[in-house]
Image (spheres, helix red, strand yellow):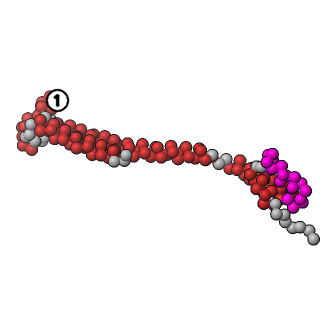
């Protein structure tokens, strides 16, 4: 009766897969396979499958684990930088809004001087003929504005500084809470 399997078949497969087959450490298993028909066929088949696996791996060109790890670390660092920059961007937008609001407040507060400086009081032709003159119109407009904004300029500066300090404290909280 012919032997259909050998007890050392798995050792032959392991030696081929691990790369010990070609090294000095695989000498004993190679001698066994040379004398055992079943193990020599198993070794031949395992070597063919290993070459095919190497060809498929080379064709796929999978990146190394180190490269994948490095890219993951880089992506995590970029995400952390974006999270850290969000409060800064928020403060920039708030500062722009406050600067626009301060410029508008300054323009409203100094409207009569701006009109006089630009010389618009004489050349303002938006009124229909025979109605209120340009000088009267600007005078009325500046009276309405001055009634709503009768506080001195120091008050405007104080409110702006308070808003700035409050927003900076909020931004500092957003930045440092991540740590």
Residue depicted at x 33% and y 48%? 177
Hey, which quadrant is residue 118 in on the image? top left
- The answer to whether residue 62 is magenta is no
Q: Residues within 10 Å of mark 1 (few under 14, many from 20)?
A: few
Residue 138 visible from this viewpoint: no
Image location (x, y in percent) of residue 143: 6, 40
Image location (x, y in percent) of residue 87: 33, 44
- Disc 1 element: helix
In this picture, which residue range is highlighted in magenta?
21-39
Q: Quadrant of the N terminus?
A: bottom right
Residue depicted at x 76% and y 49%? 19
Farthest residue toward the right? 1
Q: Which residue is mark 1?
A: 118
In the rendered view, does 109 fall on the left or right side of 6?
A: left
- The answer to whether residue 26 is magenta is yes
In the rendered view, does 65 fall on the left or right side of 141?
A: right
Image location (x, y in percent) of residue 153: 12, 35
In the rendered view, does 11 fall on the left or right side of 96?
A: right
Between residues 9 and 169, which one lies in front from this camera angle? 9
């Amino acid at each position: 009766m012919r032997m259909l399997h050998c007890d050392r078949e798995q050792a032959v497969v392991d030696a081929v897969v691990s790369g010990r087959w070609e090294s000095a450490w695989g000498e004993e298993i190679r001698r066994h396979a040379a004398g055992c028909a079943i193990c020599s066929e198993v070794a031949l088949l395992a070597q063919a499958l290993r070459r095919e696996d190497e060809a498929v791996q080379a064709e796929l060109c999978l990146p190394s684990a180190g490269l994948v790890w490095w890219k993951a670390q880089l992506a995590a660092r970029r995400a952390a930088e974006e999270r850290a920059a969000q409060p800064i961007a928020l403060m920039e937008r708030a500062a722009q809004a406050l600067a626009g609001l301060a410029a508008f407040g300054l323009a409203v507060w100094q409207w009569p001087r701006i009109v006089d400086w630009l010389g618009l009081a004489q050349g303002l032709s938006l009124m229909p003929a025979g109605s209120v003159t340009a000088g009267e119109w600007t005078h009325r407009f500046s009276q309405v504005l001055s009634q709503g904004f009768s506080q001195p300029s120091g008050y405007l500066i104080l409110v702006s500084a308070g808003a700035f300090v409050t927003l900076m404290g909020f931004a500092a909280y957003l930045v440092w809470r991540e740590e």
